[in-house]
Amino acid sequence: CDMWSAYRQLPKAKLVGCWAHVRRKFFEATPKQADKQSLGRKGLDYCDQMFSLEASWAELSSAERLCKRKERLAPLMTTFFDWCRNQSVLPGSKLGRAITYALKYEETFKTVLTDGSLVLSNNLAERAIKGLVMGRKNWLFSQSFEGAKSSAIILSLLETAKRNGLDSEKYLTYLLEKLPNEESFAKKAALEAYLPWSETVQADCK
């Protein structure tokens, strides 16, 4: 997550810090002409190492990825946070704010080390809701909880379809045409046939 304070009000929520936000702050604190030994570049390098490791484990199962994280990512994070604590920089500078941000939410950024199915960055999720964020000022009926819930359901369907390589318009049309005729609508097995990754949907909605 991006550390929005409202998240901490959610009961039983397990917050996972987004390392892309940490990296972005160090990137913004590093002048283009900065050499490789500059503090900003060093912080950026730590983040890049983490993302490089994660990329190399993309095809692993969650259990395998968790083992790799404990073996290689955890020590790297420890080194990074120790490095942050040992820096003497102006708190109000861009670099100071980047370091303060990382240390303030250290435990939240380490949550990713507890579960192999968690991700290092939520950039994918942020891109998925970009359409909602860009269009919300132009849409009606989302000033109520029910309106917002309806929008979330529809947009979740469409974005999930896109992520699974479907034509979102074809998929929505498919659902509207097929589901009303589904006699066993309440059965989980019947509904699974309409999920974006099912073989039938993949064949008909691309």
Image: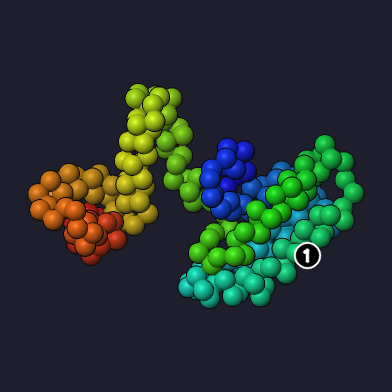
Q: Is residue 113 left or right of residue 85?
A: left
Q: From the viewer's perspective, is residue 153 above or below residue 82?
A: above
In the picture of the structure, the residue carrying the numbered disc 1 is 79
Residue drawn 87% across the image and 56% down it: 86
Residue drawn 64% across the image and 47% down it: 21
* Residue 16 locus on image (x, y percent): 59, 53
Q: Is residue 91 left or right of residue 65?
A: right
The front one of 179 and 27 is 179
Q: From the viewer's perspective, is residue 135 above or below residue 116?
A: above
* Residue 135 locus on image (x, y percent): 41, 30
Q: Is residue 40 left or right of residue 145?
A: right
Residue 2 in sight here = yes
Q: Quadrant of the C terminus?
A: bottom left
Amino acid, disc 1: Thr
Badge 1 local density, few (<14 within 10 Å), some, or many (20+)?
few
Q: In what element is the residue under mark 1?
A: helix
| Colour scheme in use | rainbow
* Residue 7 locus on image (x, y percent): 57, 42
* Residue 87 locus on image (x, y percent): 87, 52
Residue 201 in sight here = no
Residue drawn 81% across the image and 54% down it: 84
